[in-house]
Image (cartoon, rainbow, N blue to C red):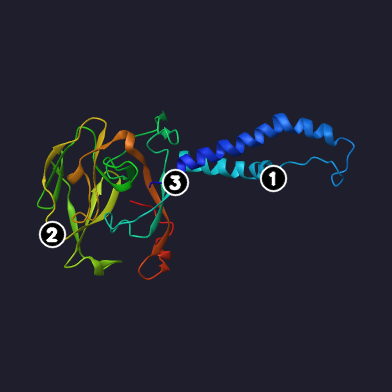
């Protein structure tokens, strides 16, 4: 069962805020009148209920978390290696929620258009086949683009995306990707990043055109990524935000913090 944390925050904000507001508007005046001329420790003195006290304490904190998470930045954890070497399993990232427009929490209705994805962005989105799942991939195709992928070569609108060989991959988690994995450097828009290719493995090939209001996504780990080549396009309304920074990285195999990755900007 999928736990909707956004819905929980909205509900918690409404409940704690409602209890606090009801006490201020209805109960406080009656309580103050009853307590007039009585000492706080005297018999018959009326105090705030425990529910009101907790609501007054938690409401500002929950509201702040809701605002930060819904409109500014939301944390996510990387669960798979599909974006290696850019993102590793165990990376914790901050996703810019206003980069692609401000949306209401839970309803996901856009209320302010602040921008659209740019080619090369690392974007978090709700998986079209199961919106309860969040995916992260690189934005390769914009609306109207023709995307072709043959012989491990990506072509966008007839322009081959040049990849510069960087040797064999020997970085984190390389042991779980055998045989040889090669590293390449690519540039898309303002982003320069590395991709991985497995010579002995062949992915799905073909040509497609991105429809209006949709995007074509690919993982940087090209031969080990479940992306738009297999399940199609991502609608604009499924976009969650742009991945900007790594704020924590935990090596799940070695059980230690990768301190060299903390604070790194995501290309």
Q: Secondary structure at mark 3?
A: strand
| Disc number for residue 74 | 3
* Closer to the eye: label 1 or 3: 1
Q: Quadrant of residue 89?
A: bottom left
Residue 112 visible in image? no
Q: Secondary structure at mark 2?
A: loop
Q: Quadrant of residue 198?
A: bottom left
Where residue 194 appears, as percent x and y from the top left, is 25, 56
Disc 1 packing (10 Å; few <14; some 14–19; many ≥20):
few
Mark closest to the chain's N terminus, 2 or 1: 1
Where residue 193 appears, as percent x and y from the top left, is 28, 53
- Return the residue nearer the eye: 230 or 7: 7
User: Is 79 drawn above or below residue 120 in the view shown?
Assistant: below
Mark closest to the chain's N terminus, 1 or 3: 1
Q: CA–CA distance between discs 2 and 1?
A: 62 Å
Can you identify the residue that label 2 sits on? 201
Q: Residue at x 38, y 46 (%)?
A: 2
Can you identify the residue that label 1 sits on? 50
- Return the residue nearer the eye: 193 or 251: 251
Where residue 3 appears, as percent x and y from the top left, is 42, 46
Where residue 23 appears, as percent x and y from the top left, is 69, 34
């Amino acid at each position: 069962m999928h736990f909707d944390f956004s819905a929980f925050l909205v509900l918690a904000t409404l409940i704690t805020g409602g209890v606090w507001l009801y006490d201020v508007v209805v109960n406080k005046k009656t309580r103050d009148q009853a307590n007039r001329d009585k000492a706080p420790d005297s018999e018959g003195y009326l105090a705030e209920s425990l529910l009101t006290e907790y609501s007054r304490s938690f409401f500002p904190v929950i509201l702040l978390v809701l605002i930060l998470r819904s409109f500014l930045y939301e944390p996510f954890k990387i669960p798979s290696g599909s974006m290696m070497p850019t993102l590793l399993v165990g990376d914790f990232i901050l996703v810019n929620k206003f980069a692609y427009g401000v949306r209401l929490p839970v309803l996901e209705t856009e209320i302010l258009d602040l921008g659209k994805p740019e080619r090369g962005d690392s974007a978090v989105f709700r998986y079209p086949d199961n919106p309860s799942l969040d995916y992260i991939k690189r934005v390769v195709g914009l609306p109207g683009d023709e995307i072709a992928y043959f012989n491990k070569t990506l072509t966008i609108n007839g322009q081959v995306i040049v990849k510069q060989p960087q040797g064999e991959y020997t970085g984190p988690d390389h042991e779980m990707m055998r045989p040889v994995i090669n590293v390449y450097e690519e540039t898309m828009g303002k982003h320069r990043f590395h991709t991985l290719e497995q010579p002995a493995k062949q992915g799905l090939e073909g040509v497609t055109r991105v429809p209006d209001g949709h995007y074509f996504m690919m993982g940087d780990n090209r031969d080990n990524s479940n992306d738009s080549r297999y399940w199609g396009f991502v609608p604009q309304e499924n976009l969650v935000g742009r991945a900007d920074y790594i704020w924590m990285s935990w090596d799940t195999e070695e059980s230690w913090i990768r301190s060299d990755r903390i604070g790194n900007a995501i290309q």
